Amino acid sequence: MEKIENYIGGELVQPASGEYFDNINPATGEVYSQIPDSDDRDVHLAADAAKAAFPAWAAMPAEQRFEILMRLVSLIERDLESLALAESIDNGKPVSLARTVDIPRAVANFRFYATAAMHLANESHDTSLPGGGKAINYTLRHPIGVAGCISPWNLPLYLFTWKIAPAIAAGCTVVAKPSEVTPMTAYLLSKLCIEAGMPAGVLNIVHGTGPKVGSAIVGHKDIKAISFTGGTKTGEEIARTAAPMFKKFSLELGGKNPNIIFADCNYEEMLATTVRSSFSNQGEICLCGSRIFVERPLYERFKQDFVERVSALKVGDPLDPATDVGAIVSRQHFDKIMSYISLAKEEGGTISTGGNAVTAETLAGYFIEPTVIEGLPHDCRTNLEEIFGPVVTIMPFDTEQEVLAYANAVRYGLSATVWTENLSRAHRISSLLESGIVWINCWLLRDLRTPFGGVKDSGLGREGGFEALRFFTEEKNVCVKL
Ligand code: NAD
């Protein structure tokens, strides 16, 4: 059985403990590879390697870093099919999605930041002194040092590279940890880094659990910045450790996103997109709209059409090209989602479609029917807590003010979607939604230059564009009196 290895100091190595744990294919429930059970000893080795590699990497002209990153881009593109297959087996997502979204986005992340780093400019200020005379202030931007990057299981290579690419492009060296639930494509990436001639120690990947490896990264004295994506509770823990050490940190956390549909929307486009924004990747995207608010005149028509389309989605083998909804990532997460479906019933909700685990001889893993629930108030637990699965609620509303209050009633504020052809209303609502991202008449339309992140308990800081390069650099102002 294949053993995943850590990537430290340019080499693939076993964990210090010599111990491994099982990696399970969620579509079959079977163990198919072994994950290093690394600990703080491995993190120390990785941090030492990253620290040693930092001066040369930081001093290297951005053009040369660009060349190395673009070699990596070519290799990921070359291996797109095998990476997509690996992602699908590891995560349970349809291979068609991994092929068209996850792996192409990993390519885009490296390409975007390899290029962006060459355009990062420093500022200067021409200063007039009170008694006459002049000074020039100029601001230098140095890579911050060794950065720690920790990512979740829902979009494994996509989100792993979304952190690593800007860090490395900015001149930092990195100690990274992918989710222990989906480590495979990060492992394959480490092999491609070797093939691409990435200098030893620039990227180090330590596999293992959050409590052992993740917390050792966050608490390591030589790791100066932490870029984290994952759950809000983990984010709190990270902040508790990193804040008193005065580390820089960026936290991309959970969500409970509203999808607000007005009766004047472009109906067909809204309907097709709402099916996608509810159930893509089994609803395991932090940006999925899980609370659907529909203006009352449209409610019954929407409910009928939506339920019909959702019932027609094909739940099945992630490797089958016809599959729309694959497997839930793990047994633990499957149990969590099923417990929320039970809670919704206890809270008085009616299951309009779905609500059950899918079992068949050929589907031995963790499958759940896409589920639509109605009849719940906006402020019950089902509508306030993150479920992160193929489960949405639908609720009618009458006025703009009312729906804004519902949308903003949760502790989260990651993204929101609004469907209306009324331009003024679209802009008015966008400015009042407590959300880091608002999509009008679309969903998950991404431009990598835009700020990405949430408000309230959805996180702190922004990724994307030059913002991420700024995060991985430290400013120093130099004032010269002329
Ligand atoms: P998680 O918080 O359990 O784990 C995320 C990562 O943190 C994993 O690599 C894990 O091993 C590590 N980790 C766990 N405990 C740690 C600790 N004490 N110290 C350091 N690292 C630790 O999250 P998950 O279950 O993997 O992912 C699902 C969550 O991620 C959902 O809440 C989802 O909304 C969120 N998410 C957010 C975004 C975003 O951009 N805001 C994107 C994707 C997912």
Image (cartoon, rainbow, N blue to C red):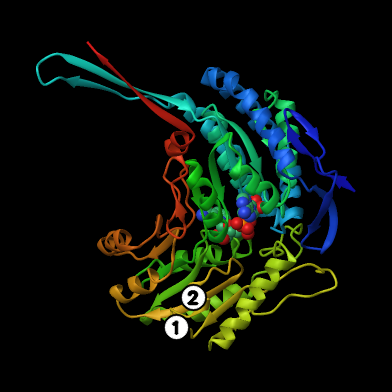
Q: Position of residue 327 (x, y in %)?
A: 72, 64
Residue 453 percent across, percent down from the top left? 45, 51
Which numbered circle lies on residue 383? 2
Estimate how packed mark 2 is, as few (under 14), some (14 to 19) or many (20 or more) residues with alpha carbons within 10 Å.
many
Q: Residues within 10 Å of mark 1 (few under 14, many from 20)?
A: some
Which residue lies at the image location 55% right of the left edge and 63% below the top edge? 276
Q: CA distance from mark 1 to mark 2?
A: 8 Å
Amino acid at dot 2: Asn
Amino acid type, residue under disc 1 in the picture: Pro
Q: What is the number of the mark on residue 377?
A: 1
- Circle 1 SS class: loop
* Relative side of 72 to 245, left or right: right
Q: Is mark 2 within 8 Å of ligand 1?
A: no
Query: Can residue 78 be seen at all in this image of the molecule?
Result: no
Quarter containing the C terminus: top left
Q: Is residue 256 visible?
A: yes
The quadrant where ligand 1 appears is bottom right
Q: In the image, what residue occupies the spot 58% across and 66% down?
A: 388
